Amino acid sequence: MSVNVDNVNISSDLCGINLKNPTVLASGILGLSMDLLKRLAGAGSGALTIKSITNAQRKGHDNPTVIAYEAGMLNAVGYSNPGAVAAAQEFSDLASLPVPVFASVVGQTPEEFATAAERLMQCDFAALEVPLSCPHTPGYGTLAGHGTPEATEEITRAVCGVTDKPVFVKLSPNVPAIGELALAALEGGAGGITAVNSMGPGMLIDIDARRPVLDFGSGGVSGPALRPVALRCVYDVHKAIRDAGRTAPVIGVGGVACGEHAMQMIQAGASAVGVGTAVYQRGPRVFGTIARELKEICCRLNADNLRDMIGAAHE
């Protein structure tokens, strides 16, 4: 018996947080203010993640910080943000939004991560994302040595010590054994994993100016070029968690621009999918489009519940 599209359930559960559909705004993409979050919530997203916040205000790298090219985007923003105190004021009315909102915090030390997290979690954030994987900002992420199992567990433990909300650790695609990092994050108390951040860094050169296009020189690669790598990372993370006899949701991020891409992530093991570059390319309505296409694909696969597809590629 064929499945009717109107009867397909594409809701998602992330550590007890219910999403009407599995699309999540990736961190750093328009999550700068309440006004932007309201606009994106009305565009069909299942959840939203704000821009990563540090304790103190940061100017970030000089412009140009983002460039689009034929295979996606290259960015080196440098974590420009108003700081944790100002961000907590900006996002003080999250209860007025119709979808869950996730905070995102970064730091140079476990203590900085924890302090920023404690300040932001005064707001009504549903969960907290902790990127340990930035490839282009000195003192942060992979350039600070955060991409090791030891650092991952230590930072995660520090953050989990100041909040009872679910913590999702965002990992780098540049590591040789991403499953080990995922398990280290879970050992530190993480509720789930976000896989992955941008890869690289990469570089584009302005041949007329005879210099790199980005002011910083190199930057993280995202969009279509990242998608096959991100998909493999999600697969590896899901397998590592399963083989360890554990369960934890994975948010798959990297080049998702349509329902087909999202279903690939879900069958690789993702419970939800982050959307970033596609918001620039296709506009905010891409969330609703992906959700509708996922329902149609479920009908094609004769599945009336999207959750039955999670990890299907491992079977």
Image (tube, rainbow, N blue to C red):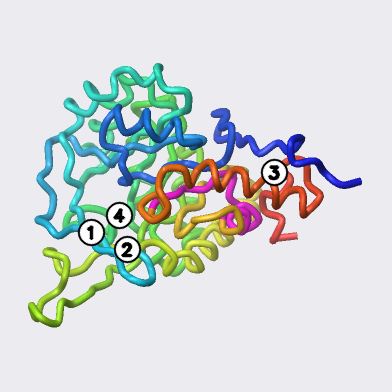
Q: Earlier in the sequence, mark 4 or mark 2?
A: 2
Badge 1: few (under 14), some or many (20 or more) residues near its Cα, within 10 Å? some
Closer to viewer: mark 2 or mark 3: 2
Q: Are marks 4 and 1 in contact (CB under 8 Å)?
A: no
Closer to viewer: mark 4 or mark 1: 1
Q: Nearer the viewer, residue 149 or 9?
A: 9
Q: Residue at x 46, y 37 (%)?
A: 189
Q: Are marks 1 and 2 in contact (CB under 8 Å)?
A: yes
Q: Residue at x 37, y 32 (%)?
A: 39
Location of the C terminus (image quadrant)? bottom right
Say the numbered circle drawn on residue 66: 1
Toward which corner of the image does residue 313 lie, by quadrant?
bottom right
Residue type beneath disc 2 = Met
Closer to viewer: mark 1 or mark 3: 1
Say the numbered circle drawn on residue 306: 3
Secondary structure category for the residue under label 3:
helix
Membership of 264 in magenta stretch: yes
Against 310, residue 210 (above or below) is below
Mark 1–mark 2 Cα distance, whole angstroms, equals: 7 Å
The part of the chain drawn in magenta is 262-276
Q: Which residue is mark 2?
A: 73
Q: Earlier in the sequence, mark 1 or mark 2?
A: 1
Q: Earlier in the sequence, mark 4 or mark 1?
A: 1
Badge 2: few (under 14), some or many (20 or more) residues near its Cα, within 10 Å? many
Q: Which residue is mark 4?
A: 146
Mark 4–mark 2 Cα distance, whole angstroms, equals: 24 Å
Q: Tell me where residue 193 appears, x and y as whole percent.
A: 48, 47
Q: Tell me where residue 34 appears, x and y as whole percent.
A: 30, 27
